Image (cartoon, rainbow, N blue to C red):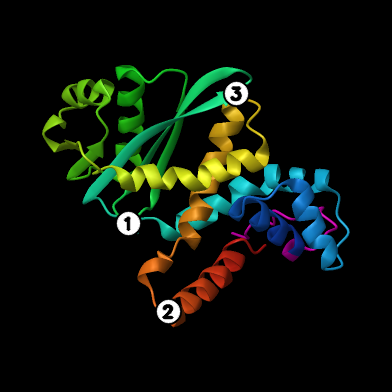
Amino acid sequence: MATKNVFKYFKTSPAIIRLAVMYYVRYPLSFRQVEDILHDRGIDICHETIRFWVSRFGAVFAKKIHKKRAGHHSNWQWHLDEVFVKINGERFYLWRAVDHEGEVLECFVTKRRDKAAAKKFLIKAMRKHGSPKVITTDKLPSYRAAFREIGVADRQLCGGRSNNRCENSHLPFRRRERAMQKFKSPAALQKFTSYHAQIYNHFNHQRHLETRQSFKQKRATALTECFNFCAA
C-alpha cells in the first residue's frame, strides 16, 4: 500500500515546511521570529502560513517520531506532577508523567486536580505505556486516593526532593508558554503539549552527561532521523 503524501497540494517545498515546524516546536520562538529566521535564509513566508503549517503538520510529525521511539522509555520509575495554566482567566491543570531519564510519557489537561482527575490521568498513562515499579509524586492527596482505588498505593514515593525530575521537565513547557503568550483553549493546550513532548523527547540528549563529541554525534543523528521521519 502506497504511503499517503501529507504534503500533497502544497506548493512549498516539504523541506521548508519541516524546518519551519521544527523551529517553532523545538525552540521557544514566536511565529514572527520563525518568519524572520527563514527570511534571513532567503525564504519569504508569512507568519500566518507558519501558524497553519504547525497546526496542520505538528501532530503528524510527532506521531511519526512517537511510532519510531515506541518502547524506548523506562518503566522502572515514573515521576508525576501537575502545573497550572491560565486560559482566558481560568485555571486549568496540565498533568505530566516522565520517566527517570526525563522522557515525557503523557500530558493531560483537566479543569480540576481532584481524585477523579488523577485517576483518569494515571489510567490513561498506564494503558499506553505499561505499569511502573515506582511512582514518584508530590504530597497532593489526590494521588494517594487515586492510587488506592487503582491498587498501586504501595508503589508511591513522595517527600523531599524526590520529584525534582518532573519539576525540572516543566521548564521547556513554561518557556514555550511565554513565547506563545498563553493558550486560547484547553483543546489547544492539549494538542500542543502532545506533539511538543514527542519532539522534545527526540532531541533531549542529557547533554550534561555526555562528552562534547558524543553529544554532537547524537544531535546530528537526531536531526537526520527527524527529517527522515517527516519525509513525504
Viewer-side residue, 29 vs 54: 29
Q: Which residues are magenta?
A: 1-15
Front position in the image: 103 or 73? 103
Return the residue at label 2: 214
Pointer 1 with pointer 3, Cβ within 8 A: no
Residue ID at (54%, 33%): 190
Few, some or many C-alpha atoms within 10 Å of disc 3 (few <14, some 14-19, many ≥20)? Answer: some
Q: Secondary structure at mark 2?
A: helix
Does the magenta-highlighted stretch encompass residue 14? yes
In the image, residue 220 sits, relative to residue 22, either above or below, namely: below
Q: Residue at x 67, y 62 (%)?
A: 232
According to the image, label 1 marks what residue? 101
Residue of label 3: 87
Q: Nearer the viewer, residue 66 or 98?
A: 98
Relative horizontal placement of residue 34, taking residue 26 as reference (left or right)? right
Please, which residue is most extreme toward the bottom here? 213
* Label 1 secondary element: loop
Magenta residues, dominant SS class: loop
